Amino acid sequence: MIDFATFGDLNEIQLGAFADKPTTTTPGQQEAARQLWQSADGLCSIGIWECTPGHFTADRTKSAEYCQILSGRATITTADGTGARDIGAGDLLVLPLGWQGAWTIHSHMRKVYFLTATAASAAT
């Protein structure tokens, strides 16, 4: 039998403790997350993430990410500086496999994330 999972109000799900954001360029920027589900092969995961205002780099060369923004505002910029998008509550952001860039969080952000990798990208 194949089982399924459901989750209630995503704004009310408690996260882990906040900790320093490893890729930040803004001293004191912190994040917290809680994984809600992971596939048996470990290639897909879904969770909730929050981050305080500041700037950080991001690398999606091993997995693509799809984000439903629940609250907050940010600007996402490509690594080469050729593209930027402002996002906020209600927006769906797609960061395809191979994307690299930076986030500037303008106001405390909360999102649902879905990460997906191919076996080849996860192995490198």
Image (spheres, rainbow, N blue to C red):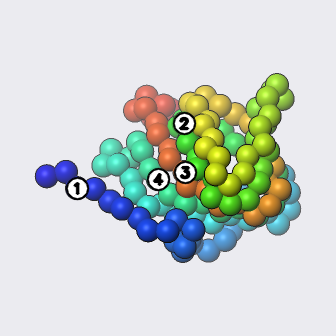
In three-dimensional space, the C-alpha distance between marks 2 and 1, rounded to whole angstroms, equals: 25 Å
In this rendered view, identify the residue nearer to me: 85 or 77: 85
| Amino acid under disc 4 | Ile
Dot 2: what SS?
Answer: strand
In three-dimensional space, the C-alpha distance between marks 3 and 4, rounded to whole angstroms, equals: 6 Å
Q: Residues within 10 Å of mark 1 (few under 14, many from 20)?
A: few
* Residue at numbered disc 1: 3
* Residue at numbered disc 2: 64
Q: Position of residue 87 (x, y in %)?
A: 73, 46
Please give the label number shown on residue 90.
none
* Residue at numbered disc 3: 113
Instruction: Give the mark, 3 or 2, whose residue is nearer the N terminus.
Output: 2
Q: Residues within 10 Å of mark 2 (few under 14, many from 20)?
A: many
Instruction: Give the mark, 1 or 4, whose residue is nearer the N terminus.
Output: 1
Q: Are marks 2 and 1 in contact (CB under 8 Å)?
A: no
* Residue at numbered disc 4: 46
Q: Position of residue 62 (x, y in %)?
A: 54, 35
Is 13 placed left or right of 2 in the picture?
Answer: right
**Which residue appears at 40% of the width and 57% of the height?**
37
Q: Residues within 10 Å of mark 4 (few under 14, many from 20)?
A: some
**Which residue appears at 41% of the width and 65% of the height?**
7
**Which residue appears at 50% of the width and 57% of the height?**
47
| Amino acid under disc 2 | Ala
Front position among marks 2 and 1: 1
Instruction: Give the mark, 1 or 3, whose residue is nearer the N terminus.
Output: 1
| Amino acid under disc 1 | Asp
In three-dimensional space, the C-alpha distance between marks 1 and 4, rounded to whole angstroms, equals: 16 Å
| Amino acid under disc 3 | Tyr
Q: Is residue 57 visible?
A: no
Q: Are marks 3 and 4 in contact (CB under 8 Å)?
A: yes
